[in-house]
Image (tube, rainbow, N blue to C red):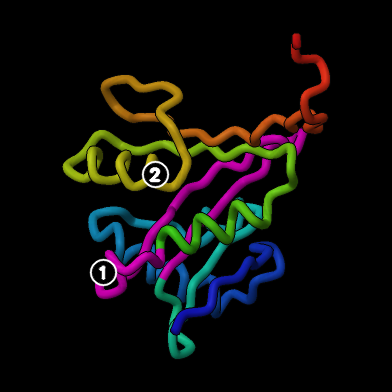
Amino acid sequence: MHMIYKLLVKSLPDVHLRKLQALVQQCFDTEMVVFSSLRCYDYAIVAQTNGRFVGALFARISLDGNQHEISKFCVAPGMRNNGLGSDMLSNLQSELPPHAGIVLYVDRDTHHDRLVQFYERNGLHIAAQNEKETMMAMKPEAPRPEYKGDEGWPE
């Protein structure tokens, strides 16, 4: 069983941030992740199993608080394809204020199509794309008007 929770990056001890850095480097085996660059994120949604980090996504919040940009979203190789990534996104969505949306960018590499399909299954849609990346977004649902029965319908 895994636990998923939100951590404020600024208050995260270096030892835990280094463990998350190692996880991100493991998931993106060709990408060097600079420790200090992780400190520029506002928060992280993390997953742990048996006290070990097995998933992480880092996010920044726009100045107006209306947009949360996801970056460095990863699940440990042995934990993929079991719903953990979807659970992490669901946790993030439940943590957002009602007016906030999500945006992230998918690089056009060998995993592009699989990742876009994953994000679409989890409520995001393609907002823009070019030859280098695809922007995925989820906007908050507009408030629905209160249902008033048959009022207003012609007889």
Q: Are there few (<14), some (14-19), or many (20+) residues within 10 Å of tag 1? A: few
Residue position marked by numbered label 2 in the rendering = 119
Where is residue 48 shown, x and y percent of the image? 48, 79
How far apart are the alpha carbons under marks 2 and 1? 18 Å
The number of numbered badges drawn on the structure is 2
Q: Nearer the viewer, mark 2 or mark 1?
A: 2
The quadrant of the picture occupied by the C terminus is top right
In magenta stretch: residue 79: yes
Extent of the magenta region: 55-84
In magenta stretch: residue 86: no
Q: Dividing the picture into quarters, in which one does residue 84 lie?
A: bottom left
The residue sitting at 53% across, 57% down in the picture is 90
Q: Is residue 134 left or right of residue 91?
A: left
Q: Residue furthest left?
A: 110
Where is residue 2 shown, x and y percent of the image? 47, 80
Which residue is nearer to you in this view: 155 or 60?
155
Q: Is residue 24 left or right of residue 114?
A: right
